[in-house]
Image (spheres, helix red, strand yellow):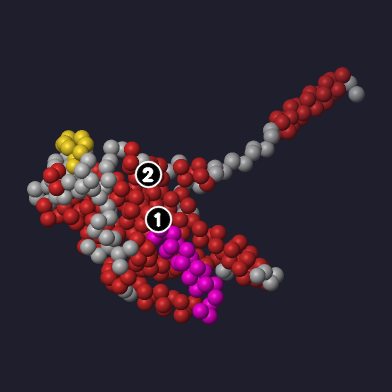
Amino acid sequence: MTDSTLSMSAAAAAAAATAVAPDAAIEPLAPPQRRSLLTRILADWSVRAGGSVLLLLVLMSLAAPWLGTIDPTAIDPGSGNLMPGTRGEFNSLAGDTFEHLFVMGTDSLGRDIWSRTLYGARVSLTVGVAVAALAMVLGMLVGLLGGYFRRIDSVIMRLMDGVMAIPGILFAISLVALFGGSLLTVVVAIAVPEIPRVARLVRSVVLTVREEPYVEAAIALDTPTWKILARHILPNAIAPLIIQATYVCASAILVEAILSFLGVGLPADMATWGNIMAEGRAQFNQYPHNVLFPGIFLALTVLAVNILGDGLRDTLDPKFNKRGG
């Protein structure tokens, strides 16, 4: 071999090595890390906005004794119908007299609207959460049974259709009139009409998941029914249930206020937003603050819960989640 041939072979080998080396040096790209569920939820502005307002309302209701309030049931006829921002003396029935700033004014009986509104937030939020929890639990059980066991599906769904045919407000009024206006009665009266809606939602999820191959494989392996429901079917219904719970909570807060406003809800001496507005409607033209301030709190609460629900739906529901993160 001549020197020129050897030089050409060496050059070709070097070129080949150069061509191969970059490809060999490239490392495979790591798959993009998927964000955690909590991170994706908090990244949604609707969740942050609605959750912040609700958190503020919860903190204000819990800290009500330290936010310049007095006993929401305390009466002083001499301080009746004071305008918002008035500072004056409050004379309790026990004979005590003290200076107080009436931030939102007083009603016709001299009760502090600011105090009654903050303490009323406790009742409204409690009713909303309790109704949502009760409706979710019972509706989930009914939906699971109806969707998985075909033999009883028709019977359960016809029963749910019958309950849905009764207007929720009329059912609540009837139940409260029959058993009295206690907190438990109001919660049950509002929750029962919501159970069929939750049951139908869970049933639709169960009917879809029941036909999946992994569920059929679990059935073929003779897996106990409760394990199939708990491990394979129920987890798929959690996200829709959470979203539905927010809407049920908002509806319950509004219905409780309507019942109290009509005088068929919680006792009139209990500080609730509906009771406050009901007591102030007779003098609304002269003293609108008696209705205006609790109405603003009610509207903000319902709006915040609905916004939170929309954010959770956009994040948890694959049909609405377009971020793919």
- Viewer-side residue, 74 vs 16: 74
Residue 240: percent from left, percent from top? 46, 58
- Residue 142's tag is none
Q: Residue furthest right?
A: 1
Helix, strand or loop at label 2? It is helix
Tell whether label 2 touches label 1 (CB within 8 Å): no
- Viewer-side residue, 290 vs 10: 290
Residue 226: percent from left, percent from top? 61, 68
Q: Start and end of the magenta stretch? A: 129-152
Helix, strand or loop at label 1? It is helix
- Viewer-side residue, 321 vs 231: 231
Q: Amino acid at mark 1?
A: Val
The residue drawn where x is 17% and y is 40% is: 84
The residue that mark 2 highlights is 62
Quick one: label 1 or label 2, which is nearer the N terminus?
A: 2
Q: Main secondary structure of the magenta part?
A: helix
Q: Residues within 10 Å of mark 1 (few under 14, many from 20)?
A: some
* Rendered position, 202 above or below 119: below
The residue drawn where x is 45% and y is 41% is: 43
The residue that mark 1 highlights is 129
The residue drawn where x is 53% and y is 80% is: 151
* Circle nearer the viewer, 1 or 2: 2
Question: Is residue 151 in the magenta section?
Answer: yes
Q: Quadrant of residue 35?
A: top right
